[in-house]
Amino acid sequence: MKKLFLPLLFFLQFLITESQTTNTNPVLTLQTGHSANFRVAFSPDGKNMVTGGTDKFVLYWDVKKGKHYEPLHGHTGAVTDVVWDSDNEHFYSCDYIGRIIKWNKNTRKSVAEFFKLDSSFIRMTFVPDKNWLVAVSKDSMVRVFDRKLNVIKKKKLADASAISVA
């Protein structure tokens, strides 16, 4: 039961559809695509979303249609987080092996990559006013990247239990 419940729980997405009639009720749509999912991120304009899961790929979704395009491959470990760049043209994904990939939303191709074996990235966030991507790894190392995924700062946190960035 638990094995079936988790994927269903993660893929239930509420999609608000704009109707030409007076009926503007939300529509509940069951999404499928990953065997198990860790993270979901909506684009800044709300038209697209990306998901990442334990199956080692990223899915790029058209929110209005409720459908995804071909899986994006490049990770060798479970995808642990996905975030959008504030430019609404790119998004990032990270994995448990130590890879961060920057993707172009139009071509759905990788445009930059950072890899540090055994970094075990677990969470990321994008800082729009600085144009920084901040990622934290399982060993509590925080790395700050520019948009080309060059490391511009890194620091080990004193608390080895860091699991999130905001």
Image (cartoon, rainbow, N blue to C red):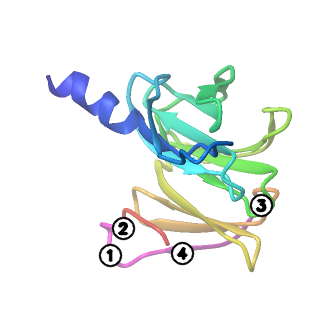
- Between disc 4 and disc 2, the foreground one is 2
Residue drawn at (36%, 79%) of the image: 158
Marks 1 and 4 sit apart, C-alpha to C-alpha, by 12 Å
Q: Give me the residue at 72% from left, 56% from top.
A: 45
**How far is disc 4 from disc 2 in space, using C-alphas?**
12 Å
CB contact under 8 Å: marks 3 and 2: no
Q: Which of marks 4 and 3 is nearer the N terminus?
A: 3
63 with respect to 24 (left or right): right
Q: Distance between the residues labelled 1 and 3?
A: 25 Å
Question: Earlier along the polypeptide chain: callout 4 or callout 2?
Answer: 4
State yes or no: residue 18 in magenta.
no
The image position of residue 54, as x and y in percent, is: 43, 30
Mark-to-mark CA distance, 4 and 3: 15 Å
Image coords of residue 137 (percent x, y): 47, 57
Kindly identify the amino acid type of the residue bearing the numbered disc 1: Asp
Label 2 near label 1: C-beta < 8 Å? yes
> Is the residue under label 2 in contact with that under label 4 (CB below 8 Å)?
no
Q: Which residue is drawn at 68% across and 19% down?
A: 70
Q: Inspect the magenta stretch and tell me whether residue 157 lies in it.
A: yes
Q: Which residue is drawn at 77% across and 66% down?
A: 146
Which is nearer the N-term, disc 3 or disc 2?
3
Q: Name the residue under label 4.
A: 155
Segment tinted magenta in the rendering: 150-162
Q: For the residues marked 3 and 2, what is the alpha-carbon distance in whole angstroms? A: 22 Å
Secondary structure of the residue carrying tag 1 is loop
Q: Is mark 3 on a helix, strand or loop?
A: loop
> On the rendered structure, is 149 left or right of 126?
right
From mark 1 to mark 2, how far is it between C-alphas? 6 Å
